[in-house]
Amino acid sequence: MGKIKHFLRNLSLRKSIVLYIAAFTVIALILSMGTAGVCSYTSEYIQSSYPVSGEKYYLTNAAGERLGEGTYIADQVILYSPKDEQLLTVLDALPLFATPVYSSLCIMAAAFLFYQNKLKRPLSELSTASKKIAENDLNFRVSYEGTDEMGELCASYEMMRSTLAGNFASMWRQVEDRKQLNAAFAHDLRTPLTVIKGYDEILGSSDDPMVKETAATMQKHITRMENYIASMSTLRRLEDSCPEYKSVELQPFLKTLEESTRLLCAQGEKTLRFENNVGSKELCLDKSYVLQVVDNLVSNAIRYAEQTITINVKESRNGLVLSVFDDGAGFSDELIHRAASPYVTSEADRSEHFGLGLSICKLLCEHHEGQLTLENLPKGAKVTSFFKSASV
C-alpha cells in the first residue's frame, strides 16, 4: 500500500489525471451495467408473476402426438396492476438515466481525488509561503516530498525563499554596516572640525583684511560640514525610530495643524488654502510623525511656490491622506523620480538645505505603514503623504 501511495504521489499531473479518469470511467461502466442487469432481472421477475394467456399451439408427429410444451401465439395483453406498471416503466427508464448520472458522479469524484491527492497540500504550502514572503517573514521552509510538477514548483519556491533570505541577511548587514560607518564618520569628524573651528575663530580676530575674509569663507564651509554631520545623525535616528500610536481627535488636531502651517506660510509670504475633508472623529496615529511630515512638505512648498500653497486632508483606506500643492515650477523630469532620495536637491547652495526634507517625509510615512508620492500638475507640484491608522 505504501508503494502504491509513493507511486501515485510521484506520478506526473498529466498521467495522474488520465489514470483517475480511466479508473472512474471503468467504475461508471460497471455501475451502469450492474444497474441495467438488476433492472432487467427485476422486470422479468415482475412479469413472471402474471400468467400468460392466449391460444397455445403444439407440434405433433405423424401419429398426432404432441411434441414439447407448446407455444402461445397471439398472446393477449397482460394487464399489470397500476403499481407494477409504474415500477416496470421506471425499471425500463432507469438504465438510460443511470449512465450519465454515474458518469457525472465519477468525473466529480476523479476531480476531487485528483485535487485532494495531487494539488491540495502543495497549493497550501505555496499559499502559506506567498503570505509569509509578503509579510517579509522568511523563517520557514517549503516542504513537499513529491517529485511531480507540483514538487518541482515547491522546490523552486524553496530555492527562491532561501535566496531571498540570504539576500535580505546580506542587505541588512550592509545597512547596519552603513549605519555604523556613518555614525563613526560623524563622530570622528566632530573633533577635527572643532579644532578647525577654533583656529578659524583665531584667524577671524586678525586685523589683516585678507585673513579675516579667508576666515569668513572657512566659517561658511565649517557651518556646512556641521549641518551635514547633523543631517547624518538625524537620518540614522529616524531610521531606528518607531511610531507611537495614540487615538487622536482629528478636528482639534487639524485645527492646530492649520494654524501652524498658516503662520509658517505667512512668514514665507505665501497664501495658504486649507481643505479639511475628514469626517471621522478619531484615528489612531502618531501625531509627531504627521506634524514633522507636514512641516517639511510646507517648508519645501514655501521655497518653490509663487504665491499659493494648498493643503488637502481626507480619509482613505483606513488612514489619513495629506496632500500639499504649490503653484511653482514643479519637479524637473530628472528630479521627480529621485527627489525623495537622501541628499538630492535642485538647489545649488547646500549650506542649509541638503535635500533631506522629502527623504525624511518618505521615511516617516513608510514607518507609519504609509507612503509618499510625488507628481507634477499643469501648474505646480503635488506631494501626497499617507498615514495608516493602527487598530485601537
Image (tube, rainbow, N blue to C red):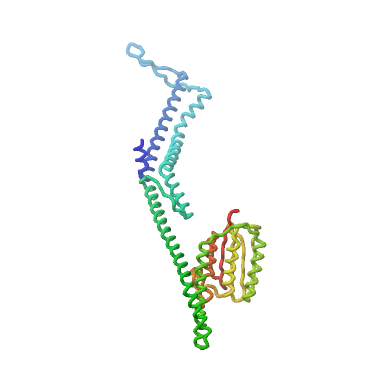
Residue closest to the eye, 117 or 297: 297
Q: Is residue 209 above or below residue 61?
A: below
Front in this rendered view, residue 67 or 363: 363
The percent coordinates of residue 372 (x first, y second) are 54, 64
Residue 254 placement, left or right of 44:
right
Q: Residue at x 65, y 59 (%)?
A: 249
Q: Residue 319: which quarter of the image?
A: bottom right
Of residue 6 and residue 55, the one placed in the foreground of this image is 6
Q: What residue is drawn where x is 39% and y is 46%? A: 144
Query: From the image, which quarter does the N terminus lie in?
Result: top left
| Rendered position, 98 above or below 173 | above
Please tell me which residue is depicted at 48% across the width and 78% down the height of the picture: 196
> What residue is shown at x 45% (from left), y 65% (from top)?
180
Q: Position of residue 108 (x, y in %)?
A: 45, 40
Instruction: Determine if residue 196 is in view.
Output: yes
User: Residue 329, percent across and down?
Assistant: 55, 75
Quarter of the figure with residue 326: bottom right
> Residue 356 in the image: x percent, y percent?
52, 70
